[in-house]
Image: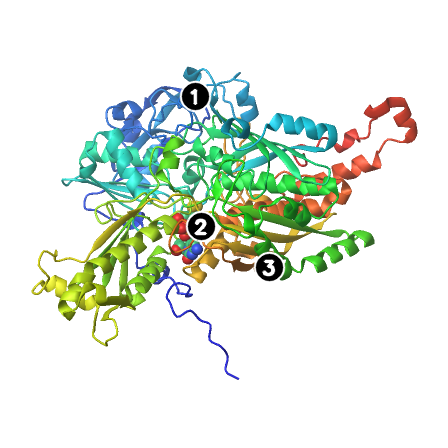
Amino acid sequence: MTAVDDRPTTEVGKDRRRKEDQRLITGRTRWTDNIQLPGMLHLAMVRSPFAHAKILSIGTDEAKAAPGVHAVFTGADLADSQGVNINAWPITPDQVTPTHLPVPSERVAHTGEIVAVVVARSAALARDAAELVDVDYEELPAVLDLKEAMKDEVLAHPDAGTNKSAFWQLDSKAAGTGGDVEEAIAKARQDGIVIEREYRQQRLVPAFMEPRSTVVDPTGEQVVIWSATQVPHILRFAIAATMGIPESKVRVIAPDVGGGFGGKLQTTPEEFATIAIARKLGKPCKYTETRSETMVSAHHGRDQWQKMTLAAEKDGTVTALKVDLLADLGAYVAIVGGGVPVLGAWMFNSIYKFPAYQFNCQTVLTNKTWVDAYRGAGRPEATYAIERIMDELAAEVGVDPIAIREKNWITHDEFPFTTVAGMTYDSGNYEAATAKALELFGYDELRAEQKRRRESGDTVQLGLGVSTFTEMCGLAPSRVLGSLSYGAGGWESASIRMLATGTVEVVSGATPHGQGHETAWSQIVADRLGIPFENVEVLHGDTQIAPKGLDTYGSRSLVVGGEALVRAADKVIEKAKPIAAHLLEASVDDLEFEAGQFTVKGTDKGIGITDIALATFAAHNLPDGVEPSIDADATFDPVNFSFPHGTHLCAMEVDTETGQSTMRKYVCVDDIGTIINPLIVEGQIHGGLVQGIAQALWEGAEYDEQGTLVSGSFVDYTLPTAADTINYVSEHTVSPSTTNTLGTKGVGEAGTIASTPAVVNAIVDALRPMGIDDIQMPCTPERVWKAIRTAGAQQDKAPTADAQAHFGEGAPNQDPAAGTTDGAAQ
Ligand code: MCN
């Protein structure tokens, strides 16, 4: 019997290996730090060792006299030229936004802030001399904890008068999208269920592979800036807006960039300082940070307290959700730092039909590294809290976590569905994704094994974790972003240039830094124009070559930039059509276009689009009035976000004697609509999963009482390696998006958003019979062990009938020697 060949005949859907990997893997590429310019000088930063301090004086004489040193600059020296780091998303008109100077001259507000810059012949000489800069500080009280910051007793910025940056609310009753949340909670307290929990999102470091680097050449007509950035277009805008250089005189180039995960969507003090100094000296300058510098000076992610109040009927039907979010911004409001927690407003309600909802978000300033978008940005945080508390509801009602979700989720026949947060989800099928995941996982068998282990008192218990998530990505409709006071739009652009010799240049406004756009974009164009995949060249990341773009973040590139590309391709075909008709001596209406060929309907007369490109280049025989070009540009602004969703299931084995949690199985079924390249998608999901799992188990940025980042290196910040991960089972269902013609939804953040609660739910599920209903992330063996011990101590010391009679409800039941939970289990 012949096997049926179901490999796709189109490029879209094909497992194409990434074109760009050839040069990346063999090192035939240019990272910013590889760029060498004649006469180039090198910068080193002098950074504050204090979390909060007045700068009393800066002695630069010794550093200036050091070998190879060209100059030393302080904030005062740069005051007239250094610009200011921007906040592009003031979430309220009265948001407290401390001025963020690249090099401050009076006061530092977090450890690692730059106080002086040394310029020398080499990076090594600059670093050596930086040690000789003598800064006299007067240490000021620092506020490090975000709950402490709320008290306003110690101020991160004394001039601001408060640490509270902004308060933002979404209330379903006020918005007309649902009922009164307080009423629904009060009712549930009478005759239903109310669950209250507080979850912690620990601080994370977006540990991209390539440290940030900037090279500036000020010697020509334009200032040319190479930067390891995700956002060359936004950087050009910010430089023009704050440094007084006309935008047309600024060229930003992001060459190959080694990852970002949101951590490179910032405009940085280091970039501004390097530009200011290069312009002052009139010489090319380079600054590349060390890994230790990345840890303290590139922005951090997450850092929230999430107070959740969920109301339900006795059978588990949800009736209200109230979220009180406290979000740490760190020392400054980063480019979209204030807005990231607010994105949770549309995500905490997730896939569930809450009749009433309220989201309250308070952002707070502290003397720590500033916080901004890290893979998922606002959506992993929200997904974590809602998926954790849905498990608590299931436990309270006494049903399986899957059953509580089925009872409350939006069913496939209810799409499009406008949620209580006012967001319209266009498509999805939670039942299908969950059914597939359960089957692949072997859910029932694993539950049976869990029961056996519980009954036999196995020291290694099994827990099953569920996460049925959705997210909003493809940032996105400019009008919606504008209504939220976001400073930029959400469109994306693409251009197609039909070269005379049959190859095609695609120019993308989206700027990949690991996502494989060159491959995926080639697949889209190859199908649309009917030309070989190999004949498409994708250009990006240089504002001179791709002048229009809003860059890559928020899993937006495909659903916005990919659709712009489709529209540009359609325009190319439309422009080629009259030329084809003219050359074939046929009417435009009689032509059809397929697989790269225009043919006269019902005949074998035809001409290929690449032949038309050549004929247009020669321009000897074009119809009257037709311009000699079939090139086209398109800019696309979607009407809505895209809403990927999926079901992630995790099995964890928890050793109750050591606290060690080991992943046994992980299955995810993601629905990201049409898939352009399954191989890229698998890579995106795997990478995303590891980051989400790492938050659950390993990673956390910890400060000491002085405000020093004690997890400031990879020795202490436990980034997982391949050896720490397992083989995940990743599958898909397809509910095409209706907001782009490709039917695609974003995938770049899905794994990170979904996986964290699946893992923690599994660990808690394993330990629930011991009375444990939360473990604060990261669930390290120590924390799990402490939680087990504390729970055990509580059970051992359960008040006797006598004690209860004596002490009443307040009967002591905790062994003081066991200590407090110390944040290990809350
Ligand atoms: N894709 C596809 N089919 C789909 C969806 C996506 O084939 N249905 C492909 C796209 O063509 C693209 C890739 O998957 O090649 C990711 O697409 P998309 O979801 O549009 O995300 P972006 O390209 O906008 O990338 C941003 C996203 C984010 S927000 C973070 S953070 C992140 C991520 O991508 N950072 C990354 N993935 C990363 N991958 C690497 N290697 N490095 C990072 O820093």
Give the number of the disc on residue 748.
2
Pointer 3: residues within 10 angstroms few (<14), some, or many (20+)?
Answer: some
In the rendered view, tell whether residue 762 sits above or below residue 268: below
Give the number of the disc on residue 53.
1
Earlier along the polypeptide chain: callout 3 or callout 1? 1
Q: Distance from label 2 to label 1 (Cα)? A: 39 Å
Q: What residue type is labelled 3?
A: Lys
Q: Where on the picture, by quarter, is residue 623?
A: bottom left
Q: Distance from label 3 to label 1 (Cα)? A: 56 Å
Q: Looking at the image, which residue is at 31% across and 32% down? A: 117
Pointer 1: residues within 10 angstroms few (<14), some, or many (20+)?
Answer: many
Q: Which of 83 and 197 is in front in this view?
A: 197
Q: Which SS class for mark 1?
A: strand
Q: Looking at the image, which residue is at 48% across and 18% down? A: 155
Number of marks in picture: 3
Pointer 2: residues within 10 angstroms few (<14), some, or many (20+)?
Answer: many
Q: Nearer the viewer, residue 488 or 303?
A: 488
Earlier along the polypeptide chain: callout 2 or callout 1? 1
Q: Which SS class for mark 2?
A: loop
Which marked residue is nearer to the observer: mark 3 or mark 2?
3
Find out whether the residues at labels 3 and 1 contact each other: C-beta distance under 8 Å: no
Q: Which of 712 and 362 is in front in this view?
A: 362
Q: Does the residue labelled 2 lie within 8 Å of ligand 1?
A: yes
In the rendering, at what x and y percent does residue 10 appear?
Answer: 37, 67
Let me know if residue 209 appears in the view.
no
Let me know if residue 263 appears in the view.
yes
In the rendering, at what x and y percent does residue 316 appear?
Answer: 69, 40
